[in-house]
Image (cartoon, rainbow, N blue to C red):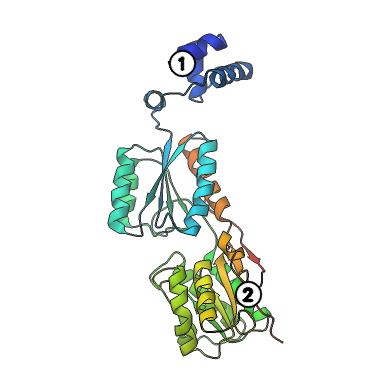
Amino acid sequence: MNPTIKDVAKKANVSIATVSRILNGLPGYSEDTKKKVTAAIADLGYQPNAVARGLINRRTQTIGVLFPNVSGMLSSEVLEGVERAAHEAGFSVIVCNTASSGSRTLKYLRLLQEKRVDGVIFASEDIKDEYAEIFKEMNVPVVLVSTASQKHNLPFVRVNDFEGAYRATEYLIHRGHRQIGMIGGSNYDPIAGVPRMEGFKAALTKHSLPFIDKMLVTNEGYRFNDGQQSLPKLLHQFPEMTAVFAASDELAIGAMSAAHQLRISVPDQLSIIGYDNLKISEMCYPPLTTVSQPLVKMGEKAGEMLTALIKEKELEAKSMYLPFTIVERQTVKRMK
């Protein structure tokens, strides 16, 4: 028979009310009493009833996380950080794969509303008005990660994408490259697509290198196949190119695959720098030089921010940009 809260109280020699207060993070007991109750819970293997606890504190101890691509390498690293912070704070995580589809996002938001989650983490997609309306209906804290919204006032955790792209391009320039191309995301993506392209162009301008359209190929996504298909296009329209800035590691590694098929040596004949520092970037050959986003830390900070808002430890969350670094590996050649 499963142990009950009454069994815990008896073993710890305290009242049921005291055990309940400790389980729900309420005040009114000493640290010594908390240790005795915690020990009793561990000894008995007691599992609190989440529904019963929810009736007391009006929480389900769950948060919802929405990703446009749960299977993507970037999403998995962000999720690792979110889950670490959530579990540390005593919350479970419901993960939803929106596949960048507006109708699917709305469906999952309604599901999370029905599940009465205590908060939502929203990743890597622009906030549409329909989403914001449901957030208001849910009346729970919402934190953005790897995205932001100019229209809707929601706290975020991310890296400055314009600055990251600027530094990546400047890194190539400082290594003697003057004919630099870019494999970018979408012109309609205000989160990562446009800022990274603008950062690329700004770095060229700063160093008196003209930008012309043939130096850039755009894509709807940031996946391996996009990079693989983009490099031949870019080489065809910009054959004098000596280096490429790719707006994601998957794009960069796709470009490296295409270069191999075209018998172009990386970095001897073509230098490539990526963006993200996914785990695969150090597994590929040659290992990829890239802009490192602290993806796990971003997820962890977003999780900490959300759980603090839920527990009312923080009344208002402050958005934060986390620092990036350039990780030097073996895909960029210094020009003489």
Which residue is denoted by mark 2 in the rendering? 331
The type of residue carrying mark 2 is Thr
Question: Which residue carries the number 1 mark?
Answer: 5
Q: Secondary structure at mark 2?
A: loop
Q: Is residue 80 left or right of residue 151?
A: right
- Closer-to-camera residue (187/319): 187
- Dot 1 or dot 2: first in sequence order is 1
Q: Residue at x 44, y 64 (%)?
A: 191
Q: Position of residue 102 (x, y in %)?
A: 30, 58
Q: Residue furthest bottom?
A: 240
Q: Is residue 69 above or below residue 249?
A: above
Question: Which residue occupies 28% across, 49% down?
Answer: 107
Quarter of the picture containing the C terminus is: bottom right
The residue shown at (57%, 59%) is: 279
Using the rendered view, name the quadrant where residue 128 is placed.
bottom left
Task: Return the residue nearer the eye: 216 or 97.
Answer: 97
Could one spot residue 260 in this view of the protein? yes
Secondary element type, mark 1 = helix
Q: Which of 17/231 is in front?
A: 231
- How far across and down, in percent of the image, does residue 55 sit? 36, 24
* Residue 283: percent from left, percent from top: 60, 64
Gap between marks 1 and 2 measured at Cα: 60 Å
